[in-house]
Image (cartoon, rainbow, N blue to C red):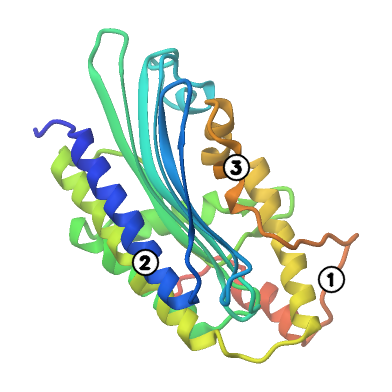
């Protein structure tokens, strides 16, 4: 079995960040801010961010490589025997909040984690995925996104897409609302089903496939006309995004508990958000269609 090669993963992730940011800068027409940072406890990263762009009201694509002497409880809870051990984590994470309500918000991350058991046995895994959060659903867009997700992982096992799709549906679910955050995609964690080289190749396929999954949707919807009604609904639905990230998201919790850089961790927050008390969309409206036709879990490729 091939052994972990963290330097190889790090080089790939830095290159992936640059490729994605270059494509997003071209789509937006606005250069992304570059902010390199160091973490006193060990490691650092590069934050790339755009605010008030032509396309993206707020968006960021971060690379981080951090180390620690004692694994935080949030990362050790699901794996007995690694709590309190030295650890290393690296990844690329992005969230894009377009201004146009007809262009969906999107999230993607790919990451690598390594530590050891008390007897010194190496422990490593990959995690990541991508999911789409539309405000006004479009069936063609959702099917394209899910077809792209399937194409990323299917070469590595026919069981992976249905497994990762169901995992995504379960993970990005607001239990207190009994409501999905969006239309899903794929999500995986603790992935080391094959040897290191094969597992890493699967991760690369996910990272490399992101732009093809998302940018065609952006180009199809970015010029759709909208008004204050659509912007108001977008701001309301963005509240669900905030609720999920602050209450349930494992990456956010791990970053804050491990002493990560707060600005980078909370980069995923949308810039304009609204909450209302017990608001419901009127029947038969495009806003109601999001709840009835898109948020319920379903097989989008059937």
Q: Quadrant of residue 69?
A: top left
Mark 3, residue position: 263
Mark 1 element type = loop
What's the residue at 21%, 56% (across, down)?
A: 157
**Residue 280 got which mark?**
1
Mark 2 or mark 1: whose residue is earlier in sequence: 2
120 left or right of 177?
left
Extreme residue in the left direction? 1
Extreme residue in the top direction? 119
Residue 134 vs residue 193, the one in the foreground? 134
Residue 185 picture location, percent across and down:
45, 63
Mark 2 element type = helix
Q: In this view, does 179 lie above or below 86?
A: below
Q: Is residue 143 above or below residue 157?
A: below
Mark 2, residue position: 22
Marks 2/3: CA–CA distance? 22 Å
Residue 27 vs residue 176, the one in the foreground? 27
């Amino acid at each position: 079995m091939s052994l972990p090669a963290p330097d190889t993963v790090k080089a790939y992730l830095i290159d992936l960040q640059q490729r994605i940011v270059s494509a997003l800068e071209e789509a937006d027409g606005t250069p992304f801010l570059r902010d390199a940072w160091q973490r006193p406890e060990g490691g650092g990263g590069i934050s790339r961010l755009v605010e008030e762009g032509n396309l993206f009201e707020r968006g960021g694509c971060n690379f981080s490589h951090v180390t620690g002497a004692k694994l935080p409880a949030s990362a050790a809870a699901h794996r007995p025997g690694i709590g309190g051990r030295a650890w290393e984590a690296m990844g690329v994470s992005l969230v894009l909040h377009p201004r146009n309500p007809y262009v969906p918000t999107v999230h993607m991350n790919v990451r690598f984690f390594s530590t050891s058991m008390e007897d010194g046995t190496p422990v490593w895994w990959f995690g990541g995925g991508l999911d789409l959060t539309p405000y006004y659903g479009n069936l063609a867009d959702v099917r394209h996104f899910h077809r792209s997700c399937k194409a990323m992982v299917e070469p590595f096992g026919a069981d992976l897409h249905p497994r990762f799709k169901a995992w995504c549906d379960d993970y990005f679910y607001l239990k207190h609302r009994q409501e999905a955050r969006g239309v899903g995609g794929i999500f995986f964690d603790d992935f080391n089903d094959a040897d290191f080289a094969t597992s890493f190749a699967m991760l690369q396929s996910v990272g490399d496939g992101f732009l093809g999954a998302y940018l065609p949707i952006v180009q199809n919807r970015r010029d759709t006309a909208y008004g204050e009604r659509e912007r108001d609904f977008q701001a309301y639905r963005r509240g669900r995004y905030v609720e999920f990230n602050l209450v349930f998201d494992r990456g956010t919790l791990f970053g804050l508990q491990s002493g990560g850089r707060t600005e980078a961790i909370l980069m995923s927050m949308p810039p304009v958000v609204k909450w209302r008390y017990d608001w419901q969309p009127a029947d038969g409206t495009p806003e109601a269609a999001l709840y009835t036709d898109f948020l319920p879990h379903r097989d989008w490729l059937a």
